[in-house]
Image (spheres, coloured by chain):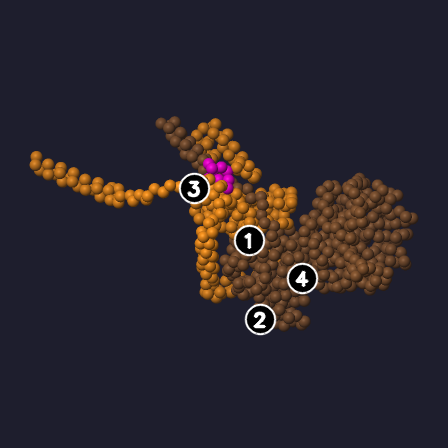
Chain colours: A orange, B brown
Amino acid sequence: MIRSLIYSITFHSVLVLLTILSLPFMLREPIDLPPIVSVELIQITDKTSIPYAPKARKIIEETKKKEEERLVSEQAPPAAKAKEKPDRIPLPNEMKEEKKIIKKKQNPEEVKPEIRQSSEFEKKEIVDTNEIAALIDKAKEEEAVKQTKTDKITQSTQKNSFATGLTLSQEDALRAQIFGCWSVPLGLPYDENLLVRIKLQLKKDGTIMKSEILDHQRMNKPGQKFYKVLAESALRAVRLCQPLKVPPTGYDKWKNLQLNFNPTEMLKG
Amino acid sequence: MKKILLVFILNIFLFNKSFALIEIDITRGNLDPLPIAVSPLYVDIKSENYEGIKIKELGEDISKIIEDNFKSTGLFNPLKKEAFVQKPDIAHLKPRFEDWRLIKAQALVTGKLLVINGKLKVEFRLWDLAAAKEMTALAFTTTPSNWRRVAHIISDKIYERLTGEEGYFDTRIIYVAESGPKEQRVKKLAIMDQDGANTKYLTLGNELVLTPRFNPTNQMVTYMSYFRNMPRVYLLDIETGTQEVVGNFPGMTFAPRFSPDGKKIVMSFAKDGNSDIYTMDIDSRVVERITNHSSIDTSPSFSPDGKFIAFNSDRSGLQQIYVMRSDGSGVKRITFGNGIYGTPVWSPRGDLIAFTKMRKGRFYIGVMRTDGSGERLLTENYYQEAPSWSPNGRVLVFYRETKSGSKGEGFTAKLWSIDITGYNERRLKTETDASDPSWSSLLSK
């Protein structure tokens, strides 16, 4: 009897000890709550028009200058790079005939349509909407059709709202930033459908993690030179613009972004 | 249980929908010319000397021509070489993209040349600096004396890669070189590269010459000159220098132009105060009458597919532009605006017709659609006319007379070019006064 009591006490003690050690909250330090500071809530649209105090502006400008200077020094070329062996890049083929042109290498990174017919983004969307909807209910198929319809090459008519992650002023700021970076190729015809859709995956600081032209297979089709030129200019604009002016919060909402580049209005003058 | 599972899946689905993809429409951008860096071509140290050519300076010279070509388009902004961050040989092998981006360049042109065994070998690469990748790379081999043409061909290839349109730099312009006082004006046929270099005179200036036009292969020229004191249409072979009168017309012939296939010449033939449009087959010499009207029909110009002819006529009272089928049927007036319209020229793209318009004593160069709609006047002046299209249908060249002298007693005639957007009006370099320009097609095509 005493023996079994000792066993019981020992086992229970071990269990209690294990429980104490395995529960991390037991070890947590008491939360150090900061003192409550009252703040005034204002709309972002109002905030953007508030000028900086002169002193604050000075500090910001100085910080920006320092950052720029640091950027330059970081991007200084490494000495070793200049000593790269010339034979790394193959010489173009020589020609026997005069004035004849040899096409050596065009777009080494271009993707052949037969290898990759649709973008990874598009594939994901197709799986997420259509397949799940079909599994749930036949009635949901109609919704899936609607969803696919909106994915067609048309300019977005739906305005983004708070529910989609960006306020109108945030959206305008982003748009204005890209306007400044986009050198529109002026030789493009204005009577062709030249909408370029680029899907971006962004980091929290607004730099681009991944960019993809949704209709990239069109770029390599014959007779689509203008589309290719426009798509390249749009990609260039996005890359030159980064980091994009994104809000500090709501990363999950804007980490995936789609930009629809359409120069028609500009080209028509 | 099954229902609960379905509701759960549905919830997940709807939750995902609440984070719908944000779409932003970008409908505007900046219209500044694209900043481009044209690095001097690296001259290979194995290069041998070649008569009359400074090999060491050839790399700089070629890049200068490319730069000038780009600048003339108004679409590119070549950056100053003082700001360049890499030597030409290193830049050609592997540019440091981030450094080139610091000088605000978006595209970079690098190249290398070698003169050996009497041959010039040139290679170039075009880099997209934002994407840090090569956009195109080509190589050419030719005789060293052709170095200017190589520069123009490189310009064409880069222009095409960056704009999607064919270039127009490896082309020539034929025009009437003028000199002397107005009463005793000497007019000679002259030909030059589109940038004003390599001017050559094809006639001596003993007779007046007017309205020269290239054939599609750029080997023949048709123009109007005088034969036994009678204006007649001539045909000149540029290679051999031989010339002949076109057809045996019992009157004066003028305003000639080739058909798009180069087999026919369309022109006006005037007799007894009436002029009509005729075509003549160059090989068989068969003449065909196209219009038959009591008015003055002149300045015919074929559409690029050869199916239509645009011309001007005063059959409605004032001189206006008309379009008809190439056999003369289906004549249709296309201009109805105020003023007098003339010298219609069909664009090589086929979408527009360029013209000269005179209204209230002022002259305008303009373009309109082939049905006469969408008229746009590009430039206006005291006296200007005779537009001619660049081979890509993007630019027009024409001539303009301006008064000169302290009291405006004299005048000068010069060639000018303008983009079809109405921007980028520029004067072309010519050795003398110049009029009646005609732009060739691409020589390297």
Residue named by callout 4:
B149
The mark nearer the N terminus, 4 or 2, is 2
Tell me the distance, in whole angstroms, between the alpha carbons under discs 1 and 2.
30 Å
Assess disc 1: are there few (<14), some (14-19) or many (≥20) residues with their C-alpha within 10 Å of its C-alpha. few
Bin the neighbour count of mark 3 within 10 Å (Cα to Cα): few under 14, some 14-19, many 20 and up. Answer: few
Residue nearer the viewer, B9 or B80: B80
Q: Which mark is residue A250?
A: 3
In space, the residues marked 4 and 2 are separated at their CA atoms by 23 Å
Which residue corresponds to mark 2?
B46
**Contact (CB < 8 A) between labels 1 and 4?**
no
Query: Does A21 appear above or below A95?
Result: above
Answer above or below: position of A204 versus B178.
Answer: above
Q: Position of residue A51 (x, y in %)?
A: 49, 47
| First to last magenta residue range | A160-169
Q: Give the residue drawn at x 47%, y 62%.
A: A77
Camera-side mark, 1 or 3: 3
- Report helix, strand or loop for mark 2: loop
| Spatial separation of the CA atoms under disc 1 and disc 4 | 25 Å
Q: Residue furthest front?
A: A54
Question: Which chain is indicated by disc 4?
Answer: B
